[in-house]
Image: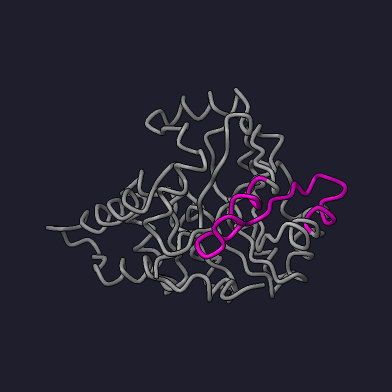
C-alpha cells in the first residue's frame, strides 16, 4: 500500500494575491492552477490512500476551509482522509476543532506556525495541542521554512516541537517536509519521542538536501519514522519517486554513504495509517 500523507486542494479564492506572487517569485515551475479537485483526484489515482489538508492561515493569505475538504473527501471515503486546520490565534479554535471532527468527520489536524503566525509554545497553541491529544488526532505541522516574505522564521525551527512533545507525550505529530532546511534537527527531535515522525514531501525539488536528510535519518536510526508524502500540487507520486531515486544515486562513484533501493521502498510503502492511528473508521 502507498499512502500519501501530505496533499493540498484549493481554488483561486483560497489564496491571496500576495501569497501567489511570493510563490511564483520563488518557485516559478509550479503549476499553481493544478489545485482543483479534479486534478487532485487524478493525481490520487496513483496511490492507495491520500490525506487531504485544510489550511486556516489568514495571516498568510492561505485559507482552505474545513468544510471544503470535508465535502471533497466525503465523496471518496475509500481513498481520501481529511485533516482539519484551525488557527490557534482564533478565540474559538478548540470549538472549531471539535466541530471539524464531530460534525465534518475530519480525522487529523494541520498546523503551520510560520503560516498562521503563532508561537508553538504559547498558551493559545497549548490549548490546541492539548485538545488534539485528547481527541486522539494526529497533527501534521509545517515546521520549516517557506517562500512567504512575511513568514517568521523564528517560529519555524523543528527543535521547538521537542518542548511540545515533552508537554504532550501522547500527541502523534508529523513534521512536514523533513523540517527543511533544518533536516538534521528534525532527526534529533523525532528520535527522542515515540509518536513523532517526519514526511518527505516537496523535498524532491532539492535532491542534494534530500540525500543528506536520508543519510542523517539512517545515522540517527530514525529511517523508519520517515513517511511518504507528495505535497500535491507541488509534487505527485511520480515526481516524488523520481526525486527519491535521483537523491539515492547522488553518491554513485564516490565514497559518500549510500542509500539502498530497499530503504527507499520502505518509505514509499510505510504503513503510515497504522502509525498515525488512522486505520479503520473513526
Residue 170 place in picture, x, y as percent? 69, 75
Q: Which residue is depicted at the point 54% across and 74% down? A: 275
Question: What's the colour scheme?
Answer: one colour
Q: Quadrant of residue 117?
A: top right
Q: Position of residue 208 (x, y in %)?
A: 31, 49
Q: Is residue 204 above or below residue 48?
A: above
Q: Which residues are magenta?
A: 68-97
Name the residue nearer the viewer: 35 or 73. Answer: 73
267 drawn magenta: no
Quadrant showing the C terminus: bottom right
Q: Residue at x 55, y 58 (%)?
A: 175
| Residue 237, percent from left and from top | 36, 54
Q: Is residue 103 above or below residue 207?
A: below
Q: Quadrant of residue 205?
A: top left
Please, is residue 117 above or below residue 247 in the view?
A: above
Task: Provide residue 107's location: percent of width, then percent of height.
Answer: 66, 63
In this image, 75 relative to 181: left or right?
right
Residue depicted at x 45% and y 29%: 26
Above-or-below relation of 214 to 207 = below
Q: Residue at x 39, y 70 (%)?
A: 1
User: In the displayed image of the protein, which residue is found farthest to the left?
Assistant: 253
Amino acid at each position: 500500500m502507498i499512502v500519501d500523507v501530505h496533499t493540498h486542494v484549493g481554488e483561486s479564492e483560497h489564496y491571496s494575491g500576495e501569497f501567489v506572487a511570493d510563490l511564483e517569485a520563488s518557485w516559478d515551475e509550479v503549476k499553481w492552477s493544478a489545485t482543483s479537485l479534479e486534478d487532485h483526484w487524478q493525481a490520487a489515482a496513483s496511490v492507495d490512500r491520500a490525506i487531504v489538508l485544510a489550511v486556516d492561515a489568514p495571516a498568510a493569505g492561505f485559507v482552505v476551509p474545513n468544510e471544503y475538504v470535508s465535502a471533497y473527501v466525503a465523496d471518496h471515503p475509500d481513498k481520501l482522509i481529511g485533516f482539519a486546520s484551525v488557527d490557534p490565534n482564533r478565540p474559538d479554535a478548540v470549538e472549531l476543532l471539535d466541530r471539524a471532527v464531530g460534525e465534518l468527520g475530519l480525522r487529523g489536524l494541520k498546523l503551520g506556525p510560520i503560516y498562521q503566525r503563532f508561537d508553538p509554545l504559547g498558551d493559545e497553541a497549548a490549548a490546541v495541542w492539548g485538545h488534539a491529544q485528547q481527541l486522539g488526532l494526529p497533527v501534521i505541522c509545517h515546521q520549516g521554512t517557506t517562500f512567504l516574505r512575511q513568514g517568521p522564521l523564528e517560529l519555524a525551527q523543528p527543535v521547538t516541537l521537542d518542548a511540545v512533545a515533552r508537554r504532550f507525550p501522547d500527541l502523534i505529530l508529523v513534521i512536514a517536509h523533513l523540517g527543511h532546511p533544518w533536516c538534521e534537527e528534525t532527526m534529533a527531535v523525532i528520535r527522542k519521542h515515540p509518536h513523532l515522525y517526519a514526511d518527505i514531501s516537496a523535498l524532491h525539488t532539492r535532491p542534494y538536501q534530500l540525500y543528506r536528510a536520508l543519510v542523517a535519518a539512517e545515522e540517527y536510526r530514525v529511517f523508519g519514522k520517515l513517511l511518504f508524502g507528495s505535497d500535491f500540487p507541488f509534487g505527485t507520486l511520480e515526481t516524488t519517486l523520481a526525486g527519491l531515486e535521483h537523491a539515492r544515486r547522488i553518491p554513485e562513484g564516490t565514497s559518500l554513504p549510500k542509500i539502498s533501493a530497499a530503504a527507499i521502498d520502505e518509505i514509499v510503502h510505510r504503513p503510515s495509517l497504522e502509525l498515525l492511528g488512522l486505520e479503520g473508521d473513526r
